[in-house]
Amino acid sequence: MKDLFLVKPNEKYQKSFENYALAYRKINDEHYFNKYIKALENFQDYLNGLHNYSKGKDLDKGEIATSTFWLINKKEVVGVVRIRHQEVECVGHIGYDISPDCRNRGYGLQILKLALEKAKEIGLEEVILTCNVDNTASKKIIEKNNGKLLGTIFDEEENEYLYKFSITLTTN
């Protein structure tokens, strides 16, 4: 776990990221596979889109600037984290996912820990995170990263209840 780090998406990890995307197709997870399918169709366009989103350029209506990072372990992409530069209702500031091939190995805890450092660099002082009330693994990850439960909210779009957490980012 000590060799884990976050990188901005780049060509060096193209093959690994393509395998990452395909891992979602393998388990029929359409939500995440559709999020990454553009990388399989045109990798450079995908990277350009992520770069523009991080700068707040070419955003769709209602979208906000979002920085994406890949969690790397031994030259392989094992996770993706998105840090929104402003809070978005029902999804908060930070969203992350771990490859289906790499789950239950502690990567979730580490990706959030590293993402909180990046959020500080972006200039955030407090981040809001949410997770489905049935997602006990995510709840534990947030709590282990000093998440304070604010309460439960209902996401009408997804038709589900979510826990809403706050993490204060301390400056060292």
Image (tube, rainbow, N blue to C red):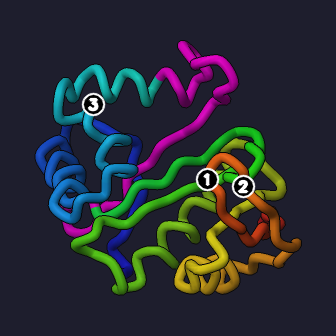
Q: Is residue 85 magenta?
A: no
Say what amino acid the circle numbered 2 marks: Asp
Rendered position, 32 above or below 115? above
SS state under label 3: helix
- The location of residue 51, given as percent across then percent down, is 45, 26
Mark 2 vs 1: CB contact within 8 A: yes
Q: Residue at x 53, y 84 (%)?
A: 137
Label 1: how many Cα within 10 Å (few below 14, some 14–19, many 20+) = few
The residue to which callout 3 is attached is 38
- The location of residue 6, given as percent across then percent down, is 42, 56
Residue range of the region highlighted in magenta in the rendering: 52-77
Cα distance between the residues tagged 2 and 1: 6 Å
Taking the image as shown, residue 60 lies to the left or right of residue 146, namely left
Q: Quadrant of the C terminus?
A: bottom right
The residue to which callout 2 is attached is 155
Which sits earlier in the primary sequence, circle 1 or circle 3?
3
Say what amino acid the circle numbered 1 marks: Glu
Between 126 and 117, the residue placed more toward the observer is: 126
Residue 170 showing in the rendered view: no
The residue to which callout 1 is attached is 158
